[in-house]
Image (cartoon, rainbow, N blue to C red):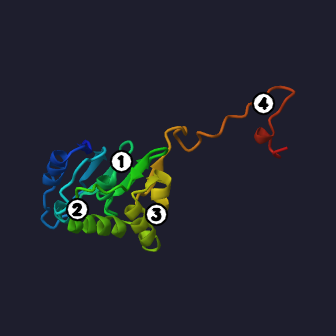
């Protein structure tokens, strides 16, 4: 039986996030082998009250979610970085923790609490401080804080042997790697 292709979503607006959220269905006690990929671009706004419902839907559906942060992203994207996802960012890209001044105090507190809960326990106070100052951090720093799992470096070659080159010996010039005694 052929394997079903992985469903991919592009999340660049609240409407896209709503469609992503609506895609999750409950399973009837069976473990779903379903996996989806969400590529999140910089969100300019977000319904913060919807996020707990999204987390519940994903948990109940037992869906595996790969969340890729595409490009430089903002504070609303950081609110999507649930540890339930496999979270990836790209090297030389950033996350801005600048919270819009248009948010009321309750929404600001909800946003800060949610983002801090995704960080490693020992990093939560540092994340709170970064949020209060509106700092911009690199994906590498986000990984150290526990906000993302993997930083993808597109400048590196793919494959496990990418950094190795073949050593060829010629007559009269044997390569030590290819001789029995290694000398």
User: Which numbered disc flags the more N-terminal residue, 1 or 3?
Assistant: 1
Kindly indicate whether the residue at mark 3 contacts the one at mark 2 (C-beta within 8 angstroms).
no
- Closer to the camera, 133 or 68? 133
* CA gap, disc 1 and disc 2: 27 Å
- Could you say where residue 71 lies in the image, as x and y percent from the top left? 38, 42
Kindly indicate whether the residue at mark 2 contacts the one at mark 4 (C-beta within 8 angstroms).
no
**Numbered label attached to residue 145:** 3
Compared with 154, 52 (above or below) is: below
* Left or right position of 77 against 23: right
Pair 1/3: label in front: 1
**Numbered label attached to residue 169:** 4
Pair 2/3: label in front: 3
Residue labelled with disc 2: 62
User: Which numbered disc flags the more N-terminal residue, 2 or 3?
Assistant: 2
* CA gap, disc 4 and disc 3: 47 Å
> Mark 4: few, some, or many residues within 10 Å (few <14, many ≥20)?
few
- Closer to the camera, 66 or 179? 66
> Mark 1: few, some, or many residues within 10 Å (few <14, many ≥20)?
many
Quadrant holding the C terminus: top right
- Closer to the camera, 104 or 44? 104
Pair 1/4: label in front: 1
* CA gap, disc 1 and disc 4: 50 Å
Q: Quadrant of residue 60?
A: bottom left
Q: Residue at x 31, y 45 (%)?
A: 42
The number of numbered discs placed on residues in the rendered structure image is 4
* Left or right position of 61 against 67: left
> Mark 3: few, some, or many residues within 10 Å (few <14, many ≥20)?
many
Furthest residue to the right?
172
């Amino acid at each position: 039986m052929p394997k079903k292709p992985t469903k991919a979503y592009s999340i660049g607006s609240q409407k896209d996030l709503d469609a992503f959220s609506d895609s999750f269905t409950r399973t009837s006690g069976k473990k779903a082998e379903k996996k989806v990929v969400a590529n999140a671009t910089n969100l300019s706004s977000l319904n913060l009250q919807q996020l707990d419902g999204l987390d519940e839907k994903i948990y109940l559906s037992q869906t595996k979610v790969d969340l890729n942060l595409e490009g430089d992203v903002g504070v609303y994207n950081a609110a999507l970085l649930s540890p339930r996802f496999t979270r990836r960012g790209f090297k030389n890209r950033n996350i801005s923790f600048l919270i819009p001044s248009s948010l009321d105090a309750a929404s600001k507190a909800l946003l800060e609490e949610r983002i801090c809960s995704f960080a490693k326990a020992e990093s939560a106070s540092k994340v709170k401080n970064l949020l209060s100052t509106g700092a911009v951090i690199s994906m590498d720093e986000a990984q150290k804080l526990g906000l993302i799992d993997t930083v993808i470096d597109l400048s590196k070659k793919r494959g496990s042997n990418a950094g190795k080159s073949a050593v060829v010996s010629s007559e009269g010039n044997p390569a030590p790697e290819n001789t029995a005694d290694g000398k």
